[in-house]
């Protein structure tokens, strides 16, 4: 993927090709989410560390689920 920015705040400065790339990637994740086995191997061998400064069970659960679905090992830090 050619999207090199650290964040996406709007599509105005993006090239049309980059927008199409992001939409194509999103379509792949939709297919994965609809499949029986919802696991990808994108983060296999990597550790995802979630650090929360306030308790938020819903946010924590969503980040954990996303990491697991991408194949990451998880570590949680609550400050």
Image (cartoon, rainbow, N blue to C red):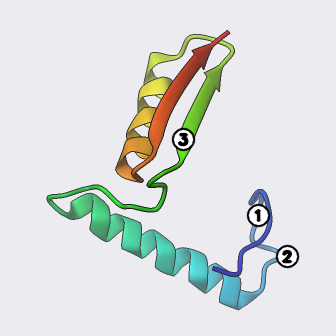
Between discs 3 and 2, the one toward the N terminus: 2
Q: Which mark is residue 10?
A: 1
For the residue labelled by badge 3, is the local secondary structure a helix, a strand or a loop? Answer: strand
Q: Which residue sits at x=43%, y=34%?
A: 64
Residue 52 appears at what percent x and percent y?
63, 19
- Cα distance, mark 1 to mark 3? 29 Å
Q: Nearer the viewer, residue 11 or 41?
A: 41
For the residue labelled by badge 1, is the local secondary structure a helix, a strand or a loop? Answer: loop
Residue 31 appears at what percent x and percent y?
29, 70
Residue pointed to by mark 2: 13
Residue pointed to by mark 3: 47
Between discs 1 and 3, the one toward the N terminus: 1
For the residue labelled by badge 2, is the local secondary structure a helix, a strand or a loop? Answer: loop
Say whether residue 71 is left or right of residue 20: left
Say whether residue 30 is left or right of residue 51: left
Q: Nearer the viewer, residue 53 or 23?
A: 53
Specify whether residue 65 is in view: yes
Say whether residue 36 is left or right of residue 53: left
Q: Single out the residue that lies furthest toward the left.
A: 36
Q: Which residue sits at x=46%, y=62%?
A: 42
Q: Residues within 10 Å of mark 3 (few under 14, many from 20)?
A: few
* Quarter of the view holding residue 32: bottom left
């Amino acid at each position: 993927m050619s999207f090199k920015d650290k964040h996406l705040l709007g599509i105005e400065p993006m090239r049309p090709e980059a927008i199409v790339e992001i939409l194509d990637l999103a379509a792949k994740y939709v297919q994965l989410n609809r499949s029986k086995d919802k696991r990808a191997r994108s983060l296999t061998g990597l550790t995802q560390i979630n650090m929360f400064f306030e308790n938020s069970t819903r946010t924590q659960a969503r980040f954990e689920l996303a990491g697991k679905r991408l194949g990451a090992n998880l570590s949680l830090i609550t400050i």
